[in-house]
Image (spheres, rainbow, N blue to C red):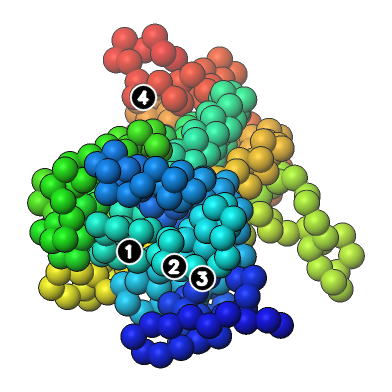
Amino acid sequence: MEYRTEKDNLGEKNIPKDCLWGIHTQRALENFRVSSDKMPCVLIRSLAFVKKACCMANLEKSYITKDKAEAIIKACDEIIEFKYIDFFPLDALQGGAGTSANMNMNEVIANRALEIMDLSYGEYSVIDPIRDINMHQSTNDVYPTAVKLAVLEQLKKLSVNIEFSQGVFQKKEKEFADIIKTGRTELQEAVPLTLGAEFSAFAEAIARDRWRVFKCEERIRSVNLGGTAVGTGLTAPRGYIFIVTEKLRELTGLGLARGENLVDQTANSDSFVEVAGILKAHASNIIKISNDLRLMNLLGEISLAPVQAGSSIMPGKVNPVILESAVQGALKVFADCNTVFETTSRASFQINEFMPLLAFSILDALDILININVMLANHLKELKANKDICEAYVSNSILIITAFVPHIGYERCEKLLKEFLSIDDKKISFKDFLTGKLGCDLVGKVLSPQALMSLGYREDGKNT
């Protein structure tokens, strides 16, 4: 392999001749060998957007020549289109508050821009990673801005996928509206309701998640771009500071705004904690719903679509693997969100030095939830209700007597229940027993879907 030699204030390094990164990336690649996780592609793309916006602002204010700017912008556009991803090899868990990621981007853009200008990699006297690509910037304003941009992009995808998931539950709510089933509290039988009502509760929980995700976008629209090292804008001209966020907003189509207090925006990451809290709430709902569906499938009230063999030893066994996967993904989201809380609280003074782990964790949580919603919704579209089994549970549940209390009184209900329980050889269901005692009309009306779901009973008795 042929090499080129690059220098920094620590000395020299040999860089593969055809490699787009430079000495700063090479040092980081050697220094940070912590995990097998790399910087998320969505974050790489967001960094390229930020660099493009900065270059456009510098061009508008004549701080960079047009020929350089055009090459830099073209290089940024290519990275935004996910080209050259292989030249961003750094471990996600890098020290330096994202400095290595920033320098990796600076070097790749610089070398690609040099190539566009028919020059060789490493000819930094023409286009320099720090002097030109990082002009009027610091890692401390570039990196957090890119993270927020990446999170905003992923939140929009998540919102769309939650809407898809919500629609599936709402469709099942209507489909199962007339199926009576046994309610359950504390894993014990309770009074009846409809299967549709049970799915309506799922749909409402997911709807709240969708609203929360939509609203939490507002919390991370304020960025500190232009604040440079500690939020004071030191080394950046005021004209550039006032337009650079506008350039980024125009490029991305996102409602970004420069923070009112850039020192605050640089030092504090609590807005990410708010987002993580919303993601954790959504993960909680996914776990609750998935576990309920697993139990309903176990009871035979519903049938999940078989998707793969469930055992290497038991022929014919099929497991609720999609739901199990959803629960595991949601538990991973819990861990990611807790990491966001930890990395935010451990920041010191004017920056969050643990921003790389924060970024990886929150983007990982978003990626998981984006995928879970599609996986779960597609699986549940094939879910079937077993009406006969649902109705059999209801017919044999002694707790259906509760529905008759407003119509025949508590004492008579109690007597009927005692009489049924005293029968030694029960050859009929409790519902059939009540039908024999109270008549088909009353039992049919009281245990109809309309009566059970009418939100209480009418004192004039018309709902019976």
- Label 2 amino acid? Tyr
Q: Which residue is mark 2?
A: 124
- Label 1 amino acid? Arg
Res 349 seen here: yes
Q: Residues within 10 Å of mark 2 (few under 14, many from 20)?
A: some
Q: Which mark is residue 122?
A: 3
Q: Which residue is mark 1?
A: 131
List x then y, in percent, for residue 374: 60, 43
List x then y, in percent, for residue 225: 24, 52
**Residue closer to the observer: 71 or 210:** 71
Say which label, 4 or 1, has the lower sequence index: 1
Q: CA distance from mark 3 to mark 4?
A: 74 Å
Say which label, 2 or 4, has the lower sequence index: 2
Q: CA distance from mark 3 to mark 1?
A: 13 Å
- Label 3 amino acid? Gly
**3 or 4: mark nearer the eye:** 3
Q: CA distance from mark 4 to mark 1?
A: 69 Å
Q: Residue at x 15, y 65 (%)?
A: 230
**2 or 4: mark nearer the eye:** 2
Res 339 seen here: no
In terms of image quadrants, where is residue 177? Answer: top right
